Image (cartoon, rainbow, N blue to C red):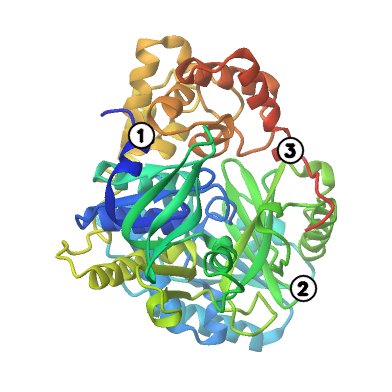
């Protein structure tokens, strides 16, 4: 397999069918779908792929049980269908997760309401068992009495515990790598992809968009990328880009909802918890030997690039969790890591982001603004990004009046998902690589592509050594720089590997990673030092606003 690198020459030279602006999960899925259908595609991202909302989430692939409260049945059904597709096409990165919903007080009415909602949830997920791999199938819900619930999860203990409902959804092992595999599949099928390449202005001639002028953050070069149709998939930045591109305030508005997450020591024995709290809810999610607490849902009015976690955010969230799960007794020192993301929501005129629909909207600017050759994607959720891409590419094919192959992304497995049964694959990988610190972790990150990592460790045994406590090894950083378009240390530490996913891995680990990447990318000693220093703010609550 040839190196996957940014082909800036091709981007500046060719005229594409589609230029996709934005390399989060929405843009990645659009580029993948279009490339698989035979269109010529350019995908550009101003930072790194999946660097923002697509990585900073609850790591869930779920139907959205709470959306039933608003009778948003079509969105729930779409989400449950897409959940099954992700379980099938990316079994290394998406797996079943059991949830408990504790019932405290409330009497029979609360229990009956939850039972009705979960029964409808199961009904809408009627095809959840239609998967060839039994390990990926999800069961229906059931009620556990207080004694059984406490035996399963002692952390639920409270004097008013009535019992708990058990139901199932799915969890991503690494959302940033799942998005990356969509980019990789697009690239393998002919797309020209580039990170750290920002669209600064649209190319407009006689009322039609013909692409965009871009700026390379690595070298500072500027050039034009030309396409017959430009698709804006910039998540929380969409309306800001539109206001600039269309010359004034855009009529297409977003609500930005801030969600924070805290990584703490494990609080459960393996189940996830969904806990009702103050007209909202929070999750306790088992993940890589720890628990993720998530998430808040508050309106955010600042610049998207400035979103962050404050000490007040952490303190208030810990107080909320302790109030509803008093057995946890969490303190500030228990927080190993934290992160914040922004949900881009279609503005429906309300100000309550928790109740705002997670629906997506496709905007054909020829119809709304009189500008041809330009489409924007607003809103949506991680789980439904594939189906949103299918709709978007369908619109593109119609606008371009081209013959294209049918959409195959509902069935085509992602590059690392080429196995029949995930359990057998994981067991075989661990057995054959018992000498690796955590072969299971690498198998989850790379799936069947792990053989490329193992080939590096066989040729250079020192690359099999762990860089930190996460199970990540040196070979991954060579591979990230050589084969996975990681251009900065942050790209590799936070999105190609798991080294930074559980907090600061320590300076020694970062310096080792920088040395390995620098040997591939030609970094000077000064450049390596600067790369290590640049990661400091990622592991600190440095902001007092937002």
For mark 3, what is the residue?
537
Q: Is residue 401 above or below residue 454?
A: below
| Distance between mark 3 and mark 2 Cα atoms | 42 Å
Query: Which residue occupies 44% across, 81% down?
Result: 368
Q: Position of residue 380 (x, y in %)?
A: 48, 69
Q: Position of residue 539 (x, y in %)?
A: 72, 38
Query: Which residue occupies 41% across, 79% down?
Result: 370
Q: Report the front residue among 336 and 28.
A: 28
| Distance between mark 1 and mark 2 Cα atoms | 42 Å
Quarter of the image that includes the N terminus:
top left
Q: Position of residue 218 (x, y in %)?
A: 53, 33
Disc 2 on helix, strand or loop?
A: loop
First in residue order: circle 1 vs circle 3: 1
Camera-nearest label, 3 or 2: 3
Disc 1 on helix, strand or loop?
A: helix
Report the disc number at residue 160.
2
Query: Which residue occupies 49% across, 70% down?
Result: 378
Residue 91 shows in this picture? no
Single out the residue that lies furthest toward the front. Answer: 206
First in residue order: circle 3 vs circle 2: 2
| Distance between mark 1 and mark 3 Cα atoms | 38 Å
Q: Is residue 34 above or below residue 173?
A: below
Q: Report the front residue among 320 and 238.
A: 238
Query: Which residue occupies 42% across, 51% down?
Result: 94
For mark 1, what is the residue?
427
């Amino acid at each position: 397999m040839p190196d996957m690198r940014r082909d800036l020459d091709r981007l500046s030279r060719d005229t594409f069918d589609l230029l996709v602006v934005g390399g989060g999960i929405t843009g990645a899925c659009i580029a993948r779908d279009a490339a698989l259908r035979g269109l010529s595609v350019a995908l550009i991202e101003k930072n790194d792929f999946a660097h923002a909302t697509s990585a900073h989430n609850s790591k869930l692939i779920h139907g959205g049980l709470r959306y039933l409260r608003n009778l948003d049945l079509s969105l729930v059904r779409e989400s449950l269908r897409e959940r099954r597709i992700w379980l099938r096409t990316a079994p290394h990165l998406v797996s079943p997760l059991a949830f408990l919903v504790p019932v405290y007080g409330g009497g029979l009415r609360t229990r009956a309401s939850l039972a009705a909602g979960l029964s409808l949830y199961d009904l809408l997920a009627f095809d959840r068992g239609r998967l060839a791999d039994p390990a990926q199938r999800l069961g229906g819900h059931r009620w556990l009495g207080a004694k059984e619930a406490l035996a399963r999860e002692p952390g639920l203990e409270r004097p008013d515990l009535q019992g708990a409902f058990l139901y199932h959804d799915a969890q991503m092992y690494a959302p940033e790598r799942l998005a990356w595999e969509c980019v990789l599949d697009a690239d393998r099928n002919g797309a020209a992809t580039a990170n750290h390449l920002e669209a600064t202005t649209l190319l407009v001639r006689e009322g039609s968009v013909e692409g965009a002028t871009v700026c390379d953050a690595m070298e500072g070069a500027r050039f034009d990328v030309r396409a017959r149709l430009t698709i804006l998939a910039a998540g929380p930045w969409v309306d800001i880009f539109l206001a600039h591109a269309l010359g004034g305030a855009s009529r297409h508005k977003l609500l930005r909802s801030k969600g924070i997450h805290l990584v703490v020591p494990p609080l459960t024995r393996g189940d996830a918890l969904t806990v009702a709290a103050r007209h909202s809810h929070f999750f306790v999610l088992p993940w890589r030997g720890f628990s993720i607490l998530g998430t808040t849902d508050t309106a955010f009015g600042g610049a998207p690039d400035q979103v962050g976690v404050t000490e007040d955010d952490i303190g208030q969230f810990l107080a909320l969790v302790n109030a509803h799960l008093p057995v946890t007794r969490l303190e500030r020192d228990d927080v190993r890591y934290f992160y914040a993301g922004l949900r881009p929501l279609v503005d429906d005129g309300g100000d309550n982001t928790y109740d705002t629909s997670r629906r997506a909207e496709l905007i054909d600017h020829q119809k709304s603004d009189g500008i041809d050759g330009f489409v924007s994607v607003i809103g949506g959720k991680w789980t439904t990004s594939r189906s949103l891409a299918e709709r978007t590419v369908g619109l593109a094919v119609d606008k371009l009046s081209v013959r294209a192959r049918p959409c195959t992304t509902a069935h085509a497995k992602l590059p690392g998902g080429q196995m029949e049964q995930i359990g057998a694959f994981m067991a075989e990988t661990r057995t054959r690589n018992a000498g690796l610190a955590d072969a299971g972790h690498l198998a989850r990150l790379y799936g069947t592509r792990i053989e490329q990592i193992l080939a590096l460790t066989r040729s250079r045994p020192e690359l099999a050594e762990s860089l930190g406590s996460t199970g990540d090894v040196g070979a991954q950083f060579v591979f990230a720089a050589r084969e996975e378009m990681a251009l900065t240390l942050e790209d590799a530490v936070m999105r190609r590997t798991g080294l930074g996913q559980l907090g600061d891995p320590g300076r020694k680990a970062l310096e080792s990673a920088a040395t390995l990447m620098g040997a591939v990318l030609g970094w000077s000693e000064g450049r390596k030092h600067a790369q290590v220093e640049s990661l400091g703010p990622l592991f600190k609550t440095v902001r007092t606003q937002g």
